[in-house]
Amino acid sequence: MFVKYGYQPIETPAMENLSTLTGKYGEEGDRLLFKVLNNGDFLAKANKEALEHLDSNKIVPSISKRGLRYDLTVPFARFVVMHQNDLVFPFKRYQIQPVWRADRPQKGRYQEFFQCDVDVVGSDSLMYEAELIQIYDEVFAALGIEVTIKFNNRKILAGIAEAAGITDNFMDMTIAIDKLDKIGPKGIREEMLKRGISNEAVDRVNAILETKSLNGLKAIFSESETGRKGVEEIEKVMQFLNTDAAKNDVKFDITLARGLSYYTGCIFEVTAKDVKMGSIGGGGRYDDLTGIFGLKNVSGVGVSFGAERIYDVMQELNLFPKKDAAALKVLLIAFDDETHNFAFKTLGNLRAAGINADLYPEPAKMKKQMKYANSRNVPYTLIIGGDEMETGLLTLKNMTEGTQEKLHIEEIVRVLS
RNA sequence: GUGAGUAUAGCUCAGUUGGUUAGAGCGCUGGAUUGUGGUUCCAGAGGUCGCCGGUUCAAAUCCGGUUAUUCACCCCA
């Protein structure tokens, strides 16, 4: 599907320099980075002072310079900068690889998990925001998962902070309002107060969050150019999208925040309906990520699918098909060495005719072989004894009906194919 | 990073105030049925009670440590 939308596959190394990874995901993200111990006599080069005081945080830079990637976006940005002369922009790629987070594992949360990322860099066209939402919509529809695709814009959040006069507390504010659906308006009030935001500012923020219409937001952002820009971007994306045509709920949600600190514009998040699980996909636009690695003025936008969580959701909703098309069609059963040998040749004929067939490995008791056929859920068994071998009329048994008839091999092929 | 729970047969789990030989269901093996499965009945096999140490006449049971795992918070896919 990614290919259909014009994306090419790439892969990047599991390990990156820590300098590449740190500072891109927020404070919490840095803490969750897996760090790799340096090779060689790393203790000799360790920070002696930190070593003496058993200061783990302080000693890390002197004994570890590499880490496992935390997501696919940041390594991708590095990749783009590295290959900037060979790539044609806008460059569209998808990437399916594991990432690592030193989190404490629990339900829907793994220390190693696969992300499927779809990104486009080298264009700030809002067409791509719309396209990525369409990809989300189409993928989850194909998987049979009903989802809510929420989107927002960091600029709107920045506008709120400006309008409330708390630009310094931008992160604190977003972290708080991100929890609205979880802890309610009262909860986020406490959260913001706890994080050192003044009472009046909290009132202003809450008032803005109440605003339902985009035009209402525009009015509030009369003093905030960033805020207005955010609203305009949302409007443009919605113009591209025909939300009526979407198979899932696609909606603007002003409380969507997202923790990764590199996002600058539109942000996305996907949650499954009817399943208690965190987000199963997320993404956004990042204007400056390649700039950090030395390539300025290249904007990118991308979304990510969390493979394990999607699997868990499908498991919980029973969405995996019970029978797979590659299942065994017939099991051959023989009684002694002679018929077993004959059955093996018959097996070859059936397989040559394109029928998924198997033979019990030895001429065991029939009961045992039938039981095996049962547990493998085979629709047919083919019984080959002395009579069958002599007459060429083999006993084909329908395991669901319990009926059986004697047929020539040609007829059997016809029935089974 | 903070907090809580769990660990007993292949699997899911009982196991009382510490007290004879640690149980059940499912699964497995054999039989009732010489070449006919799903249902039934009978029999059997299978356990260093996570690991190390302590208390005790006696520990699956109590205590300490350790490892694994699950869950919640934080945060996130």
Image (tube, rainbow, N blue to C red):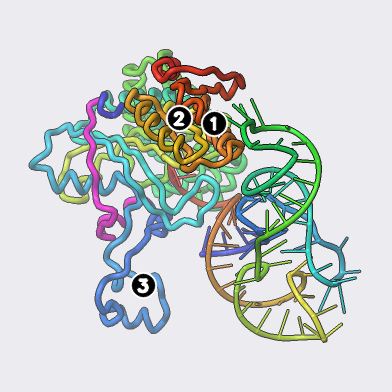
Q: CA distance from mark 2 to mark 1?
A: 9 Å
Q: What whole-number distance in Å separates the C-alpha atoms at marks 2 and 3? A: 57 Å
Q: Are marks 2 and 3 on the same chain?
A: yes
Q: Position of residue B52 (x, y in %)?
A: 61, 80
Q: Which residues are magenta?
A: A5-25
Q: Are marks 1 and 3 in contact (CB under 8 Å)?
A: no
From the image, state whether disc 2 or disc 3 is nearer to you.
2
Asked whether the beta carbons under mark 2 and mark 1 sit within 8 Å of each other, the answer is yes
Look at mark 3 in the image and give the residue it sits on. A58
Tag 3 secondary structure:
helix
For marks 2 and 1 on the same chain, the one whose residue lies earlier in the sequence: 2
Q: Amino acid at mark 2?
A: Ala
Residue designated by label 2: A327
Quadrant location, the C terminus of chain A: top left
Residue type at mark 3: give it.
Lys
Residue A16 lies in the magenta-colored region = yes
Q: Residue at x 52, y 48 (%)?
A: A198
**Residue at 27% across / 66% down in the picture?**
A65
Residue A377 is marked as: 1
Q: Quadrant of the N terminus of chain A?
A: top left
Q: Secondary structure at mark 2?
A: loop
Measure how far apart labels 1 and 3 are at the Cα level: 60 Å
In the foreground, A58 or A99: A99
Going from N to C along the chain, the mark reached first, 2 or 3, is: 3
Q: Nearer the viewer, residue A149 or A330?
A: A330
Position of residue A157 measured from the top left corner of the image (x, y, whole percent)? 41, 37
